Image (cartoon, coloured by chain):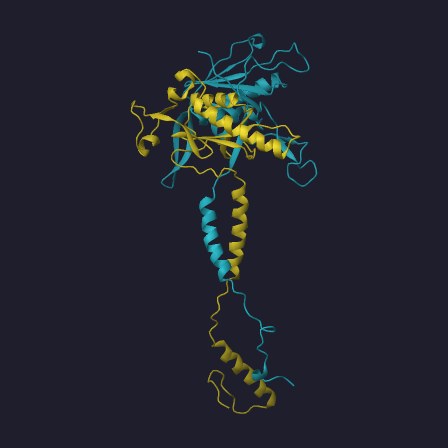
Amino acid sequence: MAHTGRHERPDHVDAGEEVAFQKKERAGVRGTEINDSLNINSIMDIMTILLVFLLVSITSDPWNVKPNQYLQLATSTVNRPPEDSLAILVTKRAIVVDNQDTVPIECMTAGGRQCRSDEDYRKEGNRYFIDKTYKEDGAESSFLIVNLLKKLTDKLDFAKEVHAGANPNEPFKAVTTIICDRDIPYRVIAEIVHTAGNAGIDQLRFAVMRTSAR
Amino acid sequence: MARKPSQASHSEMGGNEELNLSPIMALLVILIPMLLAMFNFFEVKVQAVAAPKLGTGKTSKTDPDKKPLNLTVLISKQGFLLKQQDELQDVAEKPIPKDTFEISTVENGAPVTKTVEDYDYPALYSRLRAKKQRYPDETTINIAAEMDIPWHVIARTIDAARIQLEESHFDGRERMQKYASSKPEMRTSKKDIDGDGTVTDKDQEPVPMFPRVVFVVAED
């Protein structure tokens, strides 16, 4: 019997040792075969766990807030979860309702020049305000933003109709979440809150980024 | 007698074929990067705020003659000023000016200690905590600010007023670090906080201080 040379065949063997020797040779031959199927069990485990985690995490933020240079959230230690509600996005450039720019926000640099480039928006000391042409009677001192009032009123009327059809016995709660950039001044916030109150919104929430440090 | 290898069954029914995972892998390779791109590496939470109302605030339901405290925090460029109903105030409140604090940050990978001027949130919290101890039934706080105070200052002010912390006051040069790292005071809740279906001692919630926040516009 030919032998591979790996296992040196003894000169004198009995029947039991012959069988053991043949077993060793077969094992050796099998060991030289290339196993060309890739074991992807580990990758599949990681992918499945990652997929479930991402799907659960993404549904926890109903608006999918994406910070960018015009929208940086303020931080807070509050732990109240967000609820599905009408969102008013207040960036450094505009007030956005239902993915539509409703009212532009003006920006003036500390030097008194209008912000033009992204670099201008990143500077400190900028002044953000809503032009008087978008306010009631075109008055600088007014707190009522006409375009925003109309948009919110339309949205609320539609939401009331939907609610009346789906849950006629439950009272309608007008809840709005304001997703506001951290540098927006109090004046603009007060105008938005006043306008929302006039539109019939009685519960307001402000979206913040949760931190552990106060 | 054992079968010869040539007689082994090669039928599909009895065969041990591997599952074709290529379509599933293709789906996951596309889906997971898409979900990662949508993923936010931070938590979004909400702060409840009441819209400004006309008048001086609700009178107590149990005692109609009891005037509300009307506790107001005025935020200016110089710092904080606390105000309340005149009849309930025996001594004029001193303003809480801004102060300089040392904060530790990381720049270019190295820890750096900077001195910055910031609002004195620890001092504000200490004053509000003292107010709460004196008027434990009050839950409303009015927030007023100068027109150009940014939202992040107001958010931190609401944070200082909302819940009670384990410490009742903060003082000293390191009060900002102590305040920033302080934990809320907890109490047993009547709601099922941990979601196990029962209300037990494990359901803990922060003790509220002035949880109802109202925005007001300060008169000039």
Q: Is B157 situated above or below A44?
A: above
On screen, residue A209 versus residue B114, left or right, reads: right
Q: Residue at x 47, y 44 (%)?
A: B39
The image quadrant that residue B3 belongs to is: bottom right
Image colour assigned to chain A = yellow
B113 and A34: which is toward the camera? A34
Residue A197 visible in the shown view: yes
Residue A163: x and y in percent read 60, 32
Residue A203: x and y in percent read 56, 26
A210 and B23: which is toward the camera? B23
Image colour assigned to chain B = cyan
Q: Residue at x 51, y 58 (%)?
A: B24
A201 and A15: which is toward the camera? A201
The quarter of the rendered structure image containing the N terminus of chain B is: bottom right
Q: Is A11 situated above or below B81?
A: below
Q: Residue at x 64, y 11 (%)?
A: B66
Q: Is B139 situated above or below B23?
A: above
On screen, residue A169 versus residue B87, left or right, reads: right
On screen, residue B78 versus residue A120, left or right, reads: right
How many marks the image carries: the answer is: 0
The quarter of the rendered structure image containing the C terminus of chain B is: top left
Residue A125 visible in the shown view: no
Residue A209: x and y in percent read 49, 34
Residue A63: x and y in percent read 50, 37
